[in-house]
Amino acid sequence: MGKKSRVKTKRSGSGASAVVSPKEMTNLISELLQKCSRAAPSAGKEWEEYLQIRGLVDKIRKKQKGMSIVFEGSRQDYFPGLLSWAQDCGASCDSFTVAHFGSEGYGLQATRDIKAEELFLWIPRKMLMTVESAQNSVLGPLYSQDRILQAMGNVTLAFHLLCERADPASPWLPYIRSLPEEYDTPLYYQQEEVQLLVGTQAVQDVLSQYKNTARQYAYFYKLLQTHPAASQLPLKDRFTFDDYRWAVSSVMTRQNQIPTEDGSHIILALIPLWDMCNHTNGLITTGYNLEDDRCECVALQDYKQNQQIYIFYGTRSNAEFVIHNGFFFQDNGHDRVKIKLGVSKSERLFAMKAEVLARAGIPASCIFALHSNEPPISAQLLAFLRVFCMTEEELKDFLLGEAAVHKMATLGNSEFPVSWQNEIRLWTFLETRAALLLKGHRSSWQEDGAMLEEPDLSLHSRVAVQLRLAEKQILETASASGRAKRLHLEQQLADGAPLPRCEESADAKVEEEHRHLLNGEEDVYGVEMEVRKDALSTLDSIGGSTHRGQRGGASRTEDDPKEKRE
């Protein structure tokens, strides 16, 4: 690519970067690490902590101004090189090209008609950036001695990406050059944009994401300065917060799970070119073919020449899309809001309720979800609420006697209430709890609608307002559903309607439903990995983007290995 293959120092503003003494920077980093390592603040103090952490990060970023390294030229200049490199590596590139799709950003555009379920894209392992390739790279010595890297595959990938970006001979440069320079994850939000989420159920995850990223940066900054195994890394003298934020967001929006070459376990990977696909509703159509050792993707639907090619990222909520992928998906039938519930240990019946829940495979305290569709609660949450609202006599029925096992099998089945009174109590509780969460929002529907009409509203602010509006809608629906259910049940009780009973002859069906209950809430990423040597297997995309191609792609970067839209 000639001159464009070189890197340059990024000037984020006018003038040269400030001269900062190593001691001054070390003190700031130590203060940041200390602040981020404290125990979680008391309820209501999370925003105050976020402001303190952000203030320190802003000081560090200001002193690091002009130190970040970026490639010359625009991102689109490098797409031809990406396609050429992929072709040379044995990937299939004859059915599409990279194109820009307005608000969805960059994505894949069909260059011919493609039939639904047609295999149109495959990416060989040698193109992938994985935890294994990181171990075999210049990062290997540090990886072998640092427990954080060993425990957090997403962080390992972030450092792998930074090291390869700084190496002019890296085989992955055609891919790295094609990545966005910035992302739309909340890590890039201005303070006032983040503040728009205060009062929502999503804000805690946003604040935790920022805190965790800042802590990781401070930890690794100190490690790079002191650990002997880091002396050969190209990051030692130029490791800025902006660099780490970029790498974390690249991984967060694009990371996926693939099997190792022998299929013995699962590792994290970045999958070039495929991660340009944007999201739409549908089914998972990507898998890993161990026999040919490549990622394969079949068409989600029929595509005409020049149409955009989409894939389905999984059954993620809009909060997950916004926080980990950087976009809001308007037509999200899988949207949901988190709700934390638990049986109080001070309650007189705690031991009995905890025992019934344990037999059902449900924790006494757990984070559940309220869904945007009907019914708003899952079988697991229904079972929890039934136990939560049980009387002592009802609890005994589920713990003692020959019928107890059979009763347990019906716990999450909406067709077989414990009693009319129990069912009324649980739907009353849900109605009230959802209404209280709705009151916790700091803005009205009218205020949110007015904001969205503002022509100069920033993209991040628009996404934040869309997210809180969607959350309000789910809470409103859940409360209304609880109210309707309660009124119907009260009428049933008043009419003396007989309580439906499950005949033991139907045990097979009930047991099957009980097994489904024990699976718990649906996986936040939608699917599980299935790897077979003889057929296309399901690839669990842990992140995703409408708009992987635009600014990013798939996975969460938190304290544990987890975290695409761009």
Image (spheres, rainbow, N blue to C red):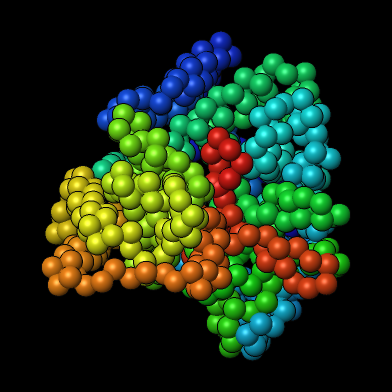
444 horizontally vs 265: left or right = left
User: In this orientation, which residue lies closer to the viewer: 541 or 479?
Assistant: 479
Q: Is residue 439 left or right of residue 395?
A: left
| Residue 279 location (% of width, % of height) | 52, 68
400 and 149: which is toward the camera: 400
Is residue 426 placed above or below 562 in the rendered structure? Answer: below
Q: Residue at x 19, y 51 (%)?
A: 432
Question: What residue is rendered at 86% in x and 54% in y?
Answer: 262
Quarter placement of the N terminus: bottom right
Along the viewing direction, whichever of 44 and 222 lies nearer the viewer = 44
At x 64%, y 79%, the residue is 299
Vertical position of residue 301 compared to residue 37: above or below: below
Query: In x, y percent, where is residue 387?
Result: 36, 49
* Residue 418 falls left or right of residue 445: right
Rendered image quadrant of residue 469: bottom left
Between residue 396 and residue 531, name the one nearer to us. 396
On the image, the x and y values in percent for residue 248 come to 57, 42
Q: Position of residue 57 (x, y in %)?
A: 45, 28
Q: Is residue 295 left or right of residue 185?
A: right
Q: Is residue 399 visible?
A: yes
Determine the residue located farthest toward the top in the rendered image.
Answer: 23
Q: Residue at x 54, y 46 (%)?
A: 556
Up-down relation of residue 488 to residue 407 (above or below) = below
Q: Is residue 330 visible?
A: no
Q: How many marks?
A: 0
